[in-house]
Image (tube, rainbow, N blue to C red):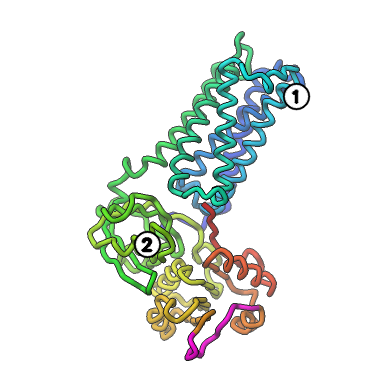
Amino acid sequence: MDLAPPLLPRRRAAIIWIVIYALVIAGPVLLVRLTQPHQGHQGFLQDLSNNLALAGFAILVLQFVMAARIPRLESPFGLDYLLRFHRAMGLLAVLMLLAHPIMLAWGTGRWWLLTRLAVPWPVELGRLALLALVVTVITAVWRQALRLEYQRWRRWHGRLVVFMLVLAFVHSLVLGVGGRGRGDLAPWPLRAVWIALAACALGVYVYHRWFHRFYHRKILHTVTSVKQESRDVWTLTFAPVLPVGRRVHSPGQFHYLTILSPHVPREEHPFSISSSPAAGEGLASTIKIVGDFTALIPKIKPGDRAYIRGPFGRFSYLVASPDKPLVLIAGGVGITPLMSMLRHLRDTRSRRSALLVFVNRSEEDIIFREELAAMEALDHPQVRVVHVLSRPSVDWRGPRGRLNRSFLIELLRGQVLEKDYYVCGPPAMAEAIILLLREIGVPPPNIHSEQFSY
């Protein structure tokens, strides 16, 4: 079985996508200026207003593309970085499109565009589109502060962005052509490009939202086992219904699960993959009960079905140097992707050494304890496991408390630089560990983590 998607050729693919992204944003502005040189004499502010609108609409189109989890686009960057960039560009689009009517009113003296309630219908569509965009960004950036439940927000977010795109498209096309055919979008080639951009956004949205319906035969899996690992952690194992088009994950990646069970709502959620791609024993995710959805995991039964979309992410030791010793630092269920890496090292009889620092509250919270002990007894790979408990029992003889500078340097035996570090755990813990690693001199390129904020 081949590991997919290919994770190593990152730089070239990333450069290609960045160039394409820049060309799509700048393309409409360049085409207008090349095909209609007279437009440059409208005045600086009016030209700036039109350019902001053209580039801002192109950014909105690309927002749909970045959110669609397209494997070839996601692989060079990692989905966590792509989604953070998606958020930043959404904020930039809001600023550009808010500036558009202000610059236009300022440059033409038509302040009624901002102050008058009764305006021509194309202008009214533009106002509604801008309002929808502002609401979309505010609810996305401050969703948790507004106490919006994720699944409900996700559904309305998708509907609102489509509504906003349609309004913005009609507004820009009607006013861009102009009453006398002298607007920026008057030439048919430019109109064709504009229509193609809108069609691309809507097409990507359909691909993303209804992917399961059109592609379900290749991503439909059966639950083969449901295993309790600890008091609040369960492992689900899956096997594909049809072995066609199956993509094998790289150790450390994650996927999106939609469980088809009468006991679980049909919602899509991301979970790390805990199985090794080299084992051939099925695809597994180890899940901790932390909310309403995960509380229903124990009710899933073997034989239930699931849609699995992925794998995604670049959090894998296969991405970094092929021979450096590994230092894996996990907190609680953050062991999941690191366990996939350790199992892959074991299954491939790798000669790389790995130090696992596993932080938990108590002994009862340690998952995979026996399997990790068995790995320590192997010659290949050379695995060393250190359990650190923050609230141990009086009988605990291992390390306790929190990781600190001196303890971490002692664990590394003074050899800090020539290692690759993988950190996964609760956000606050992961951030603290990353800062600690930088304090002891670990170069940032040697520190790997994966952070999501939905």
Q: Nearer the viewer, residue 248 or 194?
A: 194
348 left or right, relative to 105: left
Q: Quadrant of residue 433?
A: bottom right
**N-terminal label among 1 and 2:** 1
Could you tell me if residue 139 is visible in this image? yes
Q: Quadrant of residue 19?
A: top right
Q: Residue 201: image x %, image y %?
A: 48, 34
Q: Which mark is residue 295?
A: 2
Q: Residue at x 63, y 64 (%)?
A: 445
Q: Amino acid at mark 1?
A: Leu
Q: Residue 128: image x %, image y %?
A: 56, 27
Q: Quadrant of the N terminus?
A: bottom left
- Which residue carries the number 1 mark? 45
State if disc 2 and disc 1 touch (CB < 8 Å). no
- Please say if 118 is above or below 55: above
Q: Nearer the viewer, residue 81 or 135?
A: 135
**Crowding at mark 1 (Cα within 10 Å: few <14, some 14-19, many 20+):** some
